[in-house]
Amino acid sequence: MEYRAPRGTRDILPPESEGWDIILSKLTVRAEEYGYKKVIFPTFEHTELFKRGIGEDTDIVQKEMYTFQDRKGRWLTLRPEGTASLARLFVEKGIDKFNGVSKYYYFGSMFRYERPQSGRYREFYHFGVEALGSDSPYLDVELISLCKDTVESFAIKDYLIYINSIGCSECRSQYILKLGGLLKQVIAYYCEDCRRRVTTNTLRVLDCKIDKHRNAELPILSDNLCPSCSQHYDEVKKGLQTLNINWQENPNLVRGLDYYNRTVFELVTPYLGESTSILGGGRYDQLISCLGGKETPGVGFALGFDRLYQVVYSNNPDFLNSPRKGVYISSPETGLWDKVFRITFDLRNRGLKAECNYQNRSLKSQVKTADKDNYEFFLTIFQKDMVLKNLTTGEEKVYENEEEEKVLVLLSGKGDMS
Ligand SMILES: [Zn+2]
Ligand SMILES: [Zn+2]
């Protein structure tokens, strides 16, 4: 049998894996500057959590979850997104009993059974940020601002922030009634998915890509909000203005998950000629109580890490180029291996990246390897002396054996090449 990674999964190798670290550390630093703290939660949860949290009628729960029974017959599901797990831990740990705003971020792989296509995987990665404990519209603004700061910290200038309000359960259900009535007369012309959704998840008809053109005449949700939702939405826009954040209202933005209410938002950027959503989020004021916790409003977003990487990379492939670092040590003469080995470990103990050759290859091919692997120096040990070469400048200098300590001090960054 030929072993291959399962369809829709992939391996991340250097230099891409190094690029991931660069991106992740920027995201983390930014989120922490905003006061968010890291949480880690399980990769799988009880299936019921996602059914209840995300909603039975959503695409995720209907067609995309990796669900299985364990040996004791429990139904478990690989997490398709992070917010439901975060809400579960929030209730389970009793954090809902404290009055305060709790701010968390998380990073990890998510699983959805979707048709793999370029940039979309069945195991993919989310960086998520969630704030619980306040329904202030300014908290929504804070999250949108964090989204903007995040993409700008990667020098992505070409992007759009879409916002919408999908109201509360009251004004939304009245709107859905109205919308359902209007759609009934024309639904025969819509795609198969829409014909099914019109009764189970009416709002989703609005973000169907196939039937986009048919929806132009329909009334929009944000014009049908109750007074308090309408005021909330106005304040979100006011807050965005205060922070000089540009946005565009998108009445068709409804998001595919049941837990959202009021503000929803999305950030899109053109990637390979197409407008690509790299993150999306919104408010979820009922999710915590729906999972049995004390009523606690929340708002958050999830960023598609795989997409962000592709956008950052296509925008500036040079971001992967890191400066040369460390030293490669070798000897072309027999009998000096012990010294090579000892110096390598001595340098590592001094905090320097150091490598030696375990393969008996020619000196020339080792220099090539060191150059390719981005080492800054190449140190050649001879019986009578040693030669240190700077691989950036090509400069070489010979040192006597008695000067070994001087060379080690130099290499570990505490001296000059003199
Ligand atoms: Zn409302
Ligand atoms: Zn459709």
Image: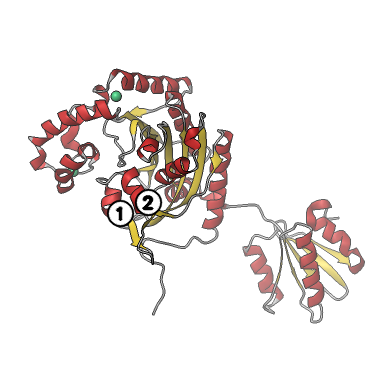
Q: Position of residue 21 (x, y in %)?
A: 56, 51
Left or right of 249 on screen, residue 374: right
- Seen in the picture, residue 27 relative to 394 is either above or below; the reply is above
Q: Position of residue 309 (x, y in %)?
A: 47, 49
Provide the secondary structure element on which disc 1 rests: helix
- Seen in the picture, residue 106 relative to 387 is either above or below; the reply is above
Specify which label sits upstream in the sequence, 2 or 1.
1
- Seen in the picture, residue 339 relative to 49 is either above or below; the reply is below
- Distance (Cα) linking label 2 and label 1: 8 Å
Q: Position of residue 226 (x, y in %)?
A: 27, 21
Q: Could you say which disc has been placed on residue 220 in the image? A: none
Query: Is residue 176 at least partly visible in the picture?
Result: yes
Observer-nearest of 350 and 170: 170
Q: Position of residue 163 (x, y in %)?
A: 35, 30
**Other-residue count near label 2 (Cα within 10 Å), few / some / many at <14 / 14–19 / ≥20:** many
> What's the amino acid at mark 1?
Glu
Left or right of 33 on screen, residue 351: right
**Other-residue count near label 1 (Cα within 10 Å), few / some / many at <14 / 14–19 / ≥20:** some
Q: Could you say which disc has been placed on residue 80 in the image? A: 2
Q: Do the residues under discs 2 and 1 have CB atoms within 8 angstroms?
A: yes
Instruction: Say which residue appears at 77% left-offset and 74% top-offset.
Output: 331
Q: Under 8 Å from ligand 2: the CB of mark 2?
A: no
Left or right of 272 on screen, residue 151: right
Question: Furthest-bottom residue in view?
Answer: 334
Instruction: Say which residue appears at 53% left-offset and 45% top-offset.
Output: 39
What residue did someone put label 1 on?
64
Asked which quadrant contains residue 201, the reply is: top left
Instruction: Say which residue appears at 40% left-offset and 61% top-offset.
Output: 9
- Seen in the picture, residue 58 relative to 231 is either above or below; the reply is below
Observer-nearest of 358 and 261: 261
Q: Under 8 Å from ligand 2: the CB of mark 1?
A: no
Q: Write down which quadrant ligand 1 falls in.
A: top left
